[in-house]
Amino acid sequence: MSLRLWFRSPRYLLTLFLSIMLVLAASFGWLSWRLLRQDRALESQRSQERLDNAADLIAASLLHKFSESRDQLTSLLALSDSDLDARAVELAGQSGGTALIVVFRPQAVDAYPRAGLLYYPFLATTQEAPAIMFEAGEVAEFQQKDLAKAVAVFRELSHSSDPAIRAGALVRLGRNLRKAQQPRAALDIYDQLDHLAATSVGGLPAELLARHARCTLLEELKRTKEVKREAGLLYSDLHNGRWKLARGAYRFYAQETNRWYTPAPELQAHQQDAVSTATAVELLWEAWQRIRRGEDTAAGHRSVWILGRPVLLVWQTSSDRLVALVAGEPYLQQQWLSVLRPLMDRQSVRLALTDAEGHPVLPQFSATSAQQATRSSAETQLPWTMRVVSRDPLVELTQERNRRHLLLLAFISLFAFVSVGSYFIARAVTRELEVARLQSDFVSAVSHEFRTPLASLCQLSEMLTDGRVPNEMRRQEYYEGLHRASERLNRLVGSLLDFGRMQAGAQPYRFELLETESFFKGVVEDFAQEALERGYQVVIAQQPHLPPVHADREALARALRNLLDNAVKYSPQNKTVWAKATTENGRVAISVSDKGLGIAPDEQRRIFKKFVRAASADAAGARGTGLGLTMVEHIVAAHGGQVWVDSELGIGSTFTILLPRAKE
Ligand code: ADP
């Protein structure tokens, strides 16, 4: 095929469409990909901005909280001792028991609420009986090993009017009675000692000494139940700030109590919290010593990590006082973060705080998103490093995935739309081109059909006019030739007009009851006569008693003649054709067979379409318009029948018309 023709061929158009479609799809895909990437970048930028914004707001809010706390502490510093007491209790109460207010003075440490501090970093010395008072008894006890004498001496002293002497004597008396194997008497003594409450003996409250000694004695006496009860009470007093103790004393008595009494797990956890708070207060005390020496800042805040717990310290000092807020994680959660929560909810973020050593002050979260806003303590002036992440990174991911799916769907739809559209356009164009080709073939075929008889007419009439005909017989032959040529032209014009009318639907059928036998015989014999002149023989076979049909005589005759005509036309070698009329399942079957060119299987359906001619006919040089079979099919269909062909290339063809029998 030449290049020019190829450019006009349907295949080229199809390729063109496909290429356009592919280019379209590729550019759309690329655009979508770019769009998606841009969208992702934009989204991540937006969410980073949101996180940064939230981080700044949270930092500002936390700083505000710090300055509020410092203001409160400053206001405490300004108060007199008695007012300070009341105000500090009030402030501590506001925290719901989650924070401790401590006040340091050079000779005193106070904590609000009292129960919040387990032990003290510093205790003022208290008035005690001078040791000399008990010397006589102790000489008897330790040097002379005379317990009876010692008991007598201490009993005497235990009646003293001075509670300090009384307490000292009772402690020693109890000890001696225990040594003298008089536990019950010792128990009574410790009962008395118990009543002396906070009176100090050797720096420890008489009450604590008495109750601890009672537990030991009861244990010796195997009074287990009582030991447990006493130890339980001792435990709760020890942890509820009943006595001001130094760290060593607290540790010792706490350990002792644990021997007899096992507190519930939540109490143990609470105790651990209290221990870390007390340790933090110790640190603060050390800091205050430094502050007083001018080695540390007079006001500040710090987050310390003690026993696996974060403790927040905020302090303010004056020349002779330090007031501080000491709080653990519950305080942060309840007092500060509760204020932040609406903001965090609104921004849909979560917050993590880590102290200077990287300990998690606020519960850490698993890093599901790479995006976060970090603020160091140097940036924010907070004692923590802040990390803000999105609360629902999964939701963001899902949104992004949904967007991607939507885009993909749009892309697929567009692709499908373009494909289908291209297919239909290509098909329509192909068809149009095919019709155009068929029409041009038709025009050339028709002109050729006309040209042959016209040429004969011209030639014969010219010879007759010129008087160049030698004799009468020849002249007669020429006249007959003229007649045949004009007949042929007439038939040609007639068939074209018929086809035109049929296409326009203007061909009215005049149905009548037709005797099949006589009709069939009449048409075929007429044709056989003509065929004989062309050297062809028509073999007629007819089943007797054929049922009549309801038909238009002329139209049906035209259809049958057409088949006969084709049989002769397309059988150039074998000059016999067969016409047969039978019944088939009660219907009339008329068939015309030849042993001619035959038709290829793929063309057997198409030849009934207008202008279509088989390749075998073209190859053999047989002329035709490609309209005959279209007309046959049209006529047969109007009679409620069917027409088909059985053919084999190079062997021959049989065309069959099947008509319904007439209803009599
Ligand atoms: P025409 O004969 O004018 O070309 P038709 O519509 O009658 O048009 O036939 C269409 C085509 O069918 C023919 O061109 C021919 O190729 C094929 N054809 C019809 N009848 C026969 C036949 N008996 N044997 C072989 N080919 C046939």
Image: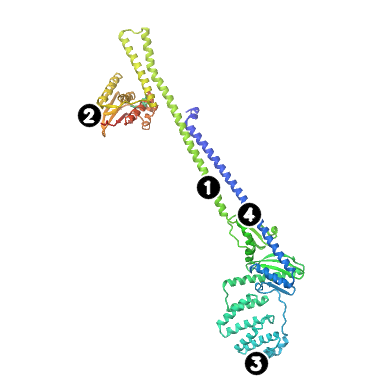
In the rendered image of this protein, does residue 137 appear above or below residue 408? below
In the rendered image of this protein, does residue 489 appear above or below residue 146? above
Marker disc for residue 148: 3
Marker disc for residue 619: none
Instruction: Look at 29% across and 32% down and name the residue there.
Output: 660
Cα separation between marks 2 and 1: 74 Å
Residue 165 in which image quadrant:
bottom right
- Secondary structure type for disc 3: helix
Estimate the x, y position of residue 398 in percent, counting from the top left.
Answer: 54, 52
In the rendered image of this protein, does residue 195 appear above or below residue 336? below
Marker disc for residue 405: 1
Q: Please tell me which of labels 3 and 2 falls first in the chain.
A: 3
> Do the CB atoms of the residues marked 3 and 4 lie less than 8 Å apart?
no
> Do the CB atoms of the residues marked 3 and 2 lie less than 8 Å apart?
no
Instruction: Look at 62% across and 83% down and name the residue there.
Output: 213
Residue named by callout 2: 545
The reply to whether residue 100 is in sight is no
Estimate the x, y position of residue 427 in percent, counting from the top left.
Answer: 46, 33
Estimate the x, y position of residue 655 in percent, counting from the top left.
Answer: 31, 29
In the rendered image of this protein, does residue 117 appear above or below residue 65? below
Marker disc for residue 51: 4
